[in-house]
Amino acid sequence: MAEPSFPAPTAEQGLLVTHFLTVRDVSRARRFYSEVLGGEIVLAENPCTIKLANTWIIMNPGGGPTPDKPGITLAAPTDAGTASAFLNLRVADIHARYDEWRGKGAEFVTEPLDRGAEIRCYLRDPDGYLIEVGQATGMLHGHYAKAGNSAK
């Protein structure tokens, strides 16, 4: 039987979303997501699974093709200046989280910046994955980012 907090959909639910990260060092990544961001370790290895708020982060080392993904190699990011996907964490108090996580060693790209619709900033995990931390402000009152400006 699976652990109660292990990510497995029920028959009624049918679908559950998790996020997989290819990491260089599982123990280092596990410490970051549990000790810095406050996630719960569900499974320490093979694959490392962390429950973070209302989702799960699954982490394993990279590797070459397998029969179910022929021709595909998994690798952690190599270029800090390019991102094609990132985690998006929504928080109730961005300044409190910024101070808390920075105090635990998180490395932020900038301090939280007020963008009108939201306040946001970005940090990187130990493998270089980009993580957006945002707090809805103006969008709670109908003030949204201008079209074409949501990720800028």
Image (cartoon, rainbow, N blue to C red):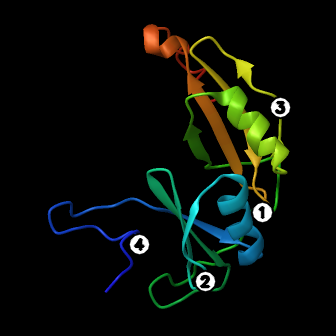
The residue carrying mark 4 is 6
Q: Are marks 2 and 3 in contact (CB under 8 Å)?
A: no
- Mark 2: few, some, or many residues within 10 Å (few <14, many ≥20)? some
Instruction: Give the secondary structure at mark 4.
Output: loop
Seen at 77% across and 76% down, the residue is 25
**Image: 139 above or below 105:** above
The residue carrying mark 2 is 45
4 vs 1, front mark: 4
Report how far apart the C-alphas of labels 2 and 3 lie in the structure: 32 Å
> Residue 122: x and y, percent?
73, 38
Q: Earlier in the sequence, mark 4 or mark 1?
A: 4
Report how far apart the C-alphas of labels 1 and 3 lie in the structure: 18 Å
Three-letter amino acid code at disc 2? Glu
Seen at 20% across and 60% down, the residue is 13
The residue carrying mark 1 is 127
Instruction: Give the secondary structure at mark 2.
Output: loop
Three-letter amino acid code at disc 3? Thr
The residue carrying mark 3 is 110
